[in-house]
Amino acid sequence: MKHKILVPSILSGFKAKKLISFFCFLSIAAGIYLQLLPSLLLKQITDEHIVPGIAQGVLSLAFVYLGAVLLSGAADLIKQYTLSRLTQSVIVEIKIRMSEKLRHLSIFTIQSKTSGEWMSYFSNDVDTIATLFTDDILTLIANLGSMAAISFTIYTLNPAVAFFVAAALPILVLISYRFNILTFRNQLKARVSLSRLNGWLNSRIQNTPTLRFFHQEADQLEKMQAPLDENYRILNKTNFYDSLFPCIMNIFRGLVLICFLLYAKQDIDSGGLLSSGSVVACVNLLLQLLAPVEAIAMQLQTIQEAASGVKRIKDFENLEEEERAEREINGGGAVIRCDDLTFAYPNQKPIFDGLSLTIRQGERIVIQGKTGEGKSTLMNLLTGLYAPDKGTVSLLNKDPFGMSEEERRQSVGVISQLFLTRQGTIRELITLNDPAITDEQLKKCCKLVKMDEVIEKLPNGYDSLLAPGSNALSNGQMQLLALACALIHEPPVLFLDEMTSGLDAESENEVFEVIRQLSQDRTIFTISHRYSDALNPTRILKLQNGRLVTAE
Ligand SMILES: Nc1ncnc2c1ncn2[C@@H]1O[C@H](COP(=O)(O)OP(=O)(O)OP(=O)(O)O)[C@@H](O)[C@H]1O
Ligand SMILES: [Mg+2]
């Protein structure tokens, strides 16, 4: 299955802002028409008042001229405002749909790319689509409309000037296009060098204790010098092109005007079609014409770049999604059961081939085994994080892989080896932002794991922020928070993966003591390298070469 992203986002983005879409298109059309008015009024003022020397009525025409200029500016303002609102609406839709899609991708698809790659889908690639809207497609249409309307008006004033314009325009587009490519390439390079700097800073901050321990902070600073110099060089180049471009365009603009005025003088001298008013109007229109031409050159270039962003979002859209369907399975009265389970990570040899296990209500199972033997993998299969390649898994008589997120959270509490790498306030880490969980539930749960007093003593209590690697709480206390997170919905089954690794024997016993007290009505599946009497297991199993055997 594949969730569509791009087209539905654009349609619903526009649909959500119907009135704004209407005003956007209206302002584009009005803008095209209104920008012609000042030039035509100038022609009228020159031909009917200034040349014959009739002052009467000039003032009111001057006010109409001023009004037309103001209205044209207002149309432009409305266009920009409505366009940016529409773009935001579309971008929000795209990001929501992308997040939704991410939820339906398999863990292995997500792990097949680096976090930087995923971030660039959500930032750079979506941003190119934003520019496509604000600066490109709709504005391109508006600019093409302006060019056509201005050219046509020039044609009605004097066809020869229109042909002259037709010859000059391609040169102008070419110069603008060339400059835009140079500037854009440099901007791209600046972005890459900036992201290198950010990456460096990120890893530098996250690894501060290690770097300081090994006296490597100064070395790290030296490493920063090179990307900084590169960034500085690129920015200099971009600024140079940015300032050169207007100079060249001004020279070109001057040349066009000189050529036109020379032609106009000759036309008037020989009694041609041009009136003085037409000359004034043409000068005005020519100057107006150059703005959309320069903009179009830029847009053609960014549209090309945006096309790569659109392609990347399309690639994202085409990622294959997991099918999760709710399925009742006969667990034969067992709380956890798997039959003939076969599983391999993508492109690897199977870890399990025909594994079976039955765990009954109230059992406390400890799974042991060497590192890399597949203990965490087994837990991920039994809790429905992965789907088996063959065989069945049943958790409370349901297929855990097909369970809804809500049902899974109510049925099992899981402590994985990865809890410590998350970031958030204590409240967020325990409740996972579930608004249905009350403060009383939170406090009760923390009391259960004997963390209530520790948390309440912190300056911000339950709202204390815990960043990865922060030392506000000890490792053992963090493990107890993980336990609170697993227990908050009081699930009947608990899965604990190496939750006491890294703890001293005394703290480990305290944690196991908490678990033992909690285990009265619960079924507990624990992965532990070390055996502890405090856990009082009903069975100890050893995972060996993909098989579960009873430990001696
Ligand atoms: N996401 C993954 N993609 C590919 N291979 C994986 C993935 N996760 C684990 N493996 C591989 O599967 C094997 C079993 O890993 P698993 O984490 O289940 O072992 P474990 O018994 O829990 O080890 P430990 O005691 O160190 O936690 C390992 O060889 C590991 O490299
Ligand atoms: Mg493990």
Image: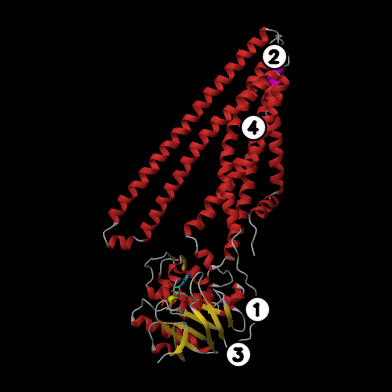
Nearer to us of marks 4 and 2 is 2
Magenta region includes residue 241: no
Q: Earlier in the sequence, mark 4 or mark 2?
A: 4
> Percent x, y for residue 168?
60, 24
Q: Residues within 10 Å of mark 1 (few under 14, many from 20)?
A: some
- Say whether residue 549 is visible: yes
State the SS at label 3: loop
Q: Which residue matches tag 4?
A: 73
Q: Earlier in the sequence, mark 1 or mark 2?
A: 2
Q: Which residue matches tag 3?
A: 333
Q: What amino acid is at disc 1?
A: Arg
Q: Earlier in the sequence, mark 3 or mark 1?
A: 1
Q: Residues within 10 Å of mark 2 (few under 14, many from 20)?
A: many
Q: What amino acid is at disc 2?
A: Leu
- Say whether residue 63 is visible: no
Nearer to us of marks 1 and 4 is 1
> Which quadrant of the figure contains the N terminus?
bottom right
Magenta region includes residue 42: yes
State the SS at label 2: loop
Boundaries of the magenta span = 40-46
Q: Earlier in the sequence, mark 1 or mark 4?
A: 4
Give the distance between the C-alpha atoms of the residues marked 3 and 1, in whole angstroms: 16 Å
Total labels: the figure holds 4
- Left or right: residue 324 versus residue 495 is right
